[in-house]
Amino acid sequence: MSVEREIIENLRKDYKSEILSEKDVAKDPIKQFGKWFKEALDSGIYEPNAMTLATSSIDRKPSARIVLLKGVDENGFVFYSNYLSAKGKEMAKNPVVALVFFWPELERQVRIEGTVEKLSKEQSSRYFSSRPKNSQIAAVVSPQSQVIINRVEIEKNWKEMEERYADRNVPKPAHWGGYLVKPQVIEFWQGRESRLHDRIVYKKADKQTWKIVRLAP
């Protein structure tokens, strides 16, 4: 165990690829995010839309997991999930959440803090209908986060649904849909040499205005 600890303690990387300056960033953090996201896409990063979603229960117990970004605009960041999952239940009781994107190939991280709300049924249905049928069926048959007897049970349900909807559309289940994270704080982190990283933070001042500050690394 001591050897493993020593190996872990000595894992480190010096970041040297880019700099991040207040004078170079966009005045709107969504535009800045769009710029960085496009660069992540263009770089060939595997699933650049993968993001950590952190939630908390009503009694302040945090939990986190990876979800996929499915949209972003001036209103915020969109993802989809099962409303009855562990995260869905937590967000229903405590809508304060955080998101984190980490793109190590670009030595970049984006942190988002805000509140979450459900998308309309129409928006969720529109996206659901665009998903591959296999994904639609999975959303129907999986009681996400609940205990199941074994994998055989869920595979049997999936096969039955596949046969039932072989030649017709799968309707969106009531327990599945989209969420919108409305940001209040967005931080852009660029790795720099000697751990003197660049951290530029946007804080919501009012409905239209963002205050831009620099944080110590």
Image (cartoon, grey):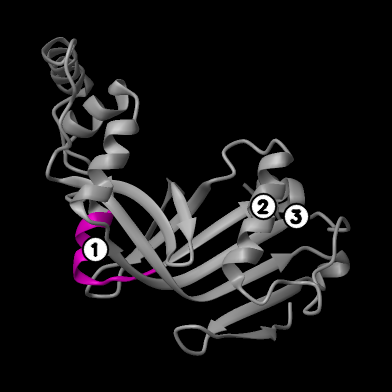
Q: Which residue is mark 1?
A: 90
Is residue 32 or residue 187 the one in the foreground?
Answer: 32
Seen at 28% across and 37% down, the residue is: 128
Dot 1, crowdedness within 10 Å: few (<14), some or many (≥20)?
many
Q: Identify the image quadrant of residue 133.
A: top left
Is residue 97 or residue 13 the one in the foreground?
Answer: 97
153 relative to 183, above or below: above
| First in residue order: circle 2 vs circle 1 | 2
Mark 3: amino acid: Glu
Q: Which residue is mark 2?
A: 5
Measured as percent of width and height from the top left, residue 132 is found at 34, 24
Q: Is residue 34 visible?
A: yes
Labelled pair 2, 1 in contact (Cβ < 8 Å): no
Mark identifier at residue 107: 3
Mark 1: amino acid: Glu
Measured as percent of width and height from the top left, residue 59 is found at 23, 75
Residue extent of the magenta highlight: 87-97
Seen at 32% across and 40% down, the residue is: 127
Circle 1: element type:
helix
Give the CA separation, mark 1 to mark 3.
31 Å
Give the CA separation, mark 2 to mark 3.
25 Å
Give the CA separation, mark 2 to mark 1.
35 Å
Mark 2: amino acid: Arg
